[in-house]
Image (cartoon, helix red, strand yellow):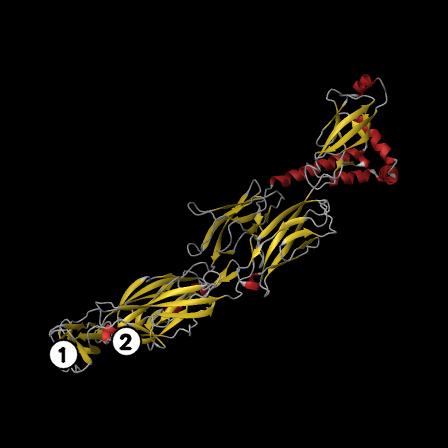
Amino acid sequence: MRNVKILHLQILFVFVHACFAQADFAPYFYDNGPYSNNGNLALFSLSEDTQVGTQIYCLNGTDPEGQEVRYGVSFDPGSKEYFRVDPKSGVITLVEKLDREKQDSIDVSISITDGRSKVTERVTIFVMDANDERPEFQNLPAMINVVETTESGSSIYKVEAVDRDAGSGGSVTFFLQMQQVSLFTIDRHSGVLRIKSGEMLDYEKTKTHFVTVIAKDGGGDYNGKEQFMSSSATLTVNVIDAQDTPPSFIGTPYFGYVYEISEEGSEIFTVVAEDGDVGKPNPIQYSFDGGDDGVFGINKTSGCIFLLTNPINLRREIFNIKVRASEVSPEGKLLDYGYTTVVIRVVDLNNNPPTFYGENGPQNMFELTIYEHPPEGEILRGLKITVNDSDQGANAKFNLRLIGPGRMLRVVPQTVLNEAQVTILVDDSAAMDYEKHQFLTYKLLAVEIDTPERFSATADIIIHLLDTNDNAPKFSLEYYIARIPENSPGGSNVVSVTAVDPDSGSWGEVKYSIYGSGADLFLIQPASGIIYTQPWASLDAEVRSKYNFYVKAEDAEGKYSLAEVFVTVLDLNDHPPAFNQNFLEKTMVIGAPVKIEAIDDDAEVPNNVIEYAIMNAEPDNNIFDINSDTGEIKLKSYIKSMAIIQNITKKRDHTWSLVVQARDRGQPSFSTTAVVKIGITEAIKSRFFSYFLGLRKRPGAVFGIFLTLVTFAITLTIFISTVIYWKSVKKTRVQPQGKIRKIMRRPLS
């Protein structure tokens, strides 16, 4: 009867479950809270500087029946798909770059489905501004024309620029580059460009100005940092000329000459003037404004000054003539004008050459003794030279030049009119070197400049140089490399160094010394520069094979130079190989080699390179091979098992004694032999017995194994007891009514 009731209850629960299964409710998104980022994306905004690949949102919803839901996003046909959603987690990722200036909102459809029902919602995502746009000029670059007479402070242009960003990032202020602010100024807000107060344009100075304008935004956030952006463009300002500048003479001052042989009508000099307004210049008319005394005339068009009378009748030597240059208007009227002075000198014939004088009259040789390397620019005061030309005017004008080795000296002045005191200066002190020149010979040449005769004169300048200690000893090499065999006796010759001092006398004598951390085992002869080992020194390449130290060469006044010495101790083959005694008893597993090792204490190859060989093997001499380079010993290739070995030896003893030789490759060669005990086993047996035999030497490992076994036995016992206990408790507590309750709680399928 009890079983029948239980069956009825089960049927009832199945029926109820079937009724509820037929009702399928649609899934839904969670509502967004005031600070929530989990829901249906409503009222969500996103900065345009968000990086592609950023997870920007997480859709979150549920199904009333508890079914697994999946998410989706979609866009209008033809629209750019900015987002991608993970259908399981609802995580939305940005996949396209945002640009608020092109699109400030994005319409997207989001969906949630449980596999049967699908819910779709349309939401709008607002794209927030980031300061990512530069100001753009609307009317630059440009070119404008401004008359040079435009008043100071006048507005000449209005610059316009637009920044597409919003807020402070979209505000624009204007600046000029620093080199333009001296002449122009710009209103930072309106962009109006003006001529700076107190300044004027001048066509005659600068015809074109290139004004660089900078437009800068008000700054804004970009990628989490404040960013300011700017642009620059150029405004070309062409200055238009105006008639505001008088004529000016070119090539002033003006000097002309009248010679004794000049004739009436001879052209003396030509003046040249041009209108200061070079944009639209007017023609020029020339005239005298005094000082000509009726002796000279001028061509009013060309500006050529000519002689009106015979020079023999002239009573003055110099004429200062004031010349006027006037602008002529297209109507022929004289306008603005300018003045200059022309100096005309009346000179005689050129009949005297230049002449050099000493303290006692004319002289053509001058000598001086000085120390080498005098300071540059120093005057050679011991040379007292005067030069003179007795002619007048241009006939007495001549050049002075020094001709000699290099450019060690120069003469002042280079151009002379009539007479001058000649000064010889040092121009290249380094070249005045006693070691190169004990004396210097120059020619002092005076040559007339503007005369047809080009009269000249020469004088010899002889400079005797005295030596100074201006050189430090110099080694023949920057460094010296020496090699010496180890075990060389004390006092052995290592290397000889050489330094030369070109100075004379005691300044050229060199004294040698050595120092440095590597110099302890060496000494040097101070006079010869020969380096020896110390009498007590013992060199051993195995202890130290490299030494380096410095050698110093010094003159009598302490000037010195250094060179570095590198000494290599050459290795000799003085050590025989020695076997490592810890590896002379081996257990060999068939198929695997064993290795022996010997060491040679020599420092270099081939003295420390070892070759191995088997000299003898007992009880059989033909079952082993050895690698002569590595010392690996292995069985012959045909020996695959213990049975083969027993057939060869007819014995059950598997221990061999091998006499192995280690020989180095030095000259002469040394060798050493050792007896190697090798026990041969097969692989499985060897591993098993080797492990347990090894435990005898490791009591700690034996104790650990024992403790592990005891712990495992106790744990297993506790586990079995616990299982038996809980089975007995379960049997005593289970009642029929309890079974019914369990059936009712069990979910119906």
The three-letter code of the residue at mark 2 reads Asn
Residue located at (78% from left, 29% from top): 660
Instruction: Please tell me how crowded label 1 is: few (under 14), some (14-19), or many (20+) other residues with Cα within 10 Å.
Output: few
Q: Residue 55 location in percent, x, y?
A: 55, 50
Q: Quadrant of residue 550?
A: bottom right
Q: Residue 650 location in percent, x, y?
A: 84, 17
Q: Is residue 394 above or below residue 167?
A: below
Visible residue check, residue 512 = yes
Q: Is residue 159 above or below residue 566?
A: below
Q: Is residue 152 left or right of residue 476?
A: left
Q: Quadrant of residue 218?
A: bottom left
Residue located at (63% from left, 47% from top): 482
Q: Residue furthest front?
A: 360
**Circle on res. 742:** none
Q: Quadrant of residue 421?
A: bottom left
Q: Residue 682 location in percent, x, y?
A: 80, 25
Q: Is residue 178 left or right of residue 572?
A: left
The residue under label 1 is 312
The three-letter code of the residue at mark 1 reads Ile
Q: Nearer the viewer, residue 322 or 54?
A: 322
Visible residue check, residue 296 = no
The residue under label 2 is 418
Q: Is residue 255 above or below residue 511?
A: below
Circle 1 SS class: helix
Q: Is residue 553 above or below residue 344?
A: above
In the rendered picture of this protein, how many numbered marks are placed on residues? 2
